[in-house]
Amino acid sequence: MRILALITQKGGTGKSTLAASLAVAAGQAGERVAALDLDPQASLTHWGQRRDADFPMVDRTTPAALAAALGALRAAGYSLVILDTAGIDSAATVAAMRAADLALIPARPSLADIEATRPTFSALARLGRPYAFVLNQCAPQLKSGRVADAVKALKLLGALALPLIALRADHQDAFAFGLGVTEHEPNGKAADEVRGLWQWANREMKE
């Protein structure tokens, strides 16, 4: 069983939306997926409550209960767990960092967002945990000067997951309906990007 964590100490980066859509994309690719919500805001939990589909399994947990929850999921035959964490430095964030086979750090293409990633990737580096940045909510053309500058900056700080994720209404619409973006608009550009991101993360966790 592999563990993929979405971690950032800055809110508003689209972390929970990405966690939800990645969980669906991984399930569609054949993984047996559980999504665990460690964020007190419970955005991922509420998304799960809006779903009609029977996958992924979505549940809430706490830092103290995380190890036991992961053990139970492993025993039940789950192949992938996605952890959604609070956008603050917290016990839940540290617990997710320690458990993760790969941590994805979402950031928008702005100086403030990139600077805000420093505590997160510094903590992951101290713990010796693999991580990569996800450049999220980019301008749809993905070639603006701001996006290009953000790509250069993040590559200097660590690995950059691909593809870049554009700001598209499909993400917000899918989340509002309890769907992954690959369910909401399977042939759309947003769905292609999320499938690509899952494929990238899957390869990284297998290496």
Image (tube, rainbow, N blue to C red):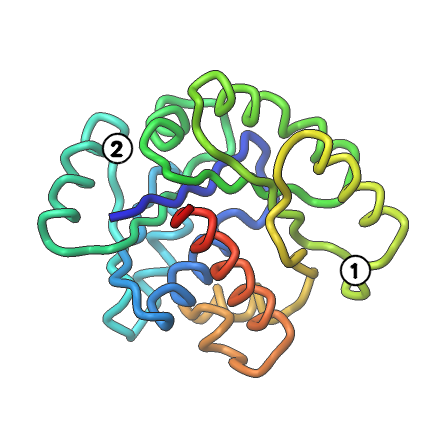
Q: Residue at x 25, y 50 (%)?
A: 59
Q: Which mark is residue 50?
A: none
On the image, which quarter does residue 167 sit in? Answer: bottom right
The answer to whether residue 18 is left or right of residue 45 is right
Mark 1: amino acid:
Leu
From this viewpoint, which residue is outermost toward the front? 207
Q: Along the horizontal axis of the image, is 75 left or right of 125? A: left
Question: Residue type at mark 2?
Answer: Thr
Report the disc number at residue 62.
2
Element under disc 1: loop
Residue drawn 51% across and 22% down? Answer: 125
Q: Earlier in the sequence, mark 1 or mark 2?
A: 2
Neighbourhood count class around disc 2 (C-alpha, 10 Å): few under 14, some 14–19, many 20 upward: some
Q: Residues within 10 Å of mark 1 (few under 14, many from 20)?
A: some
- Image position, residue 134 (x, y; %): 61, 47
Seen in the image, is 122 located left or right of residue 142?
left
- Locate residue 156: give its quadrant: top right
Name the residue tied to disc 1.
142
Please provide percent x and percent y for residue 8. Answer: 53, 34
For this rendering, which residue is in front, 177 or 133?
133
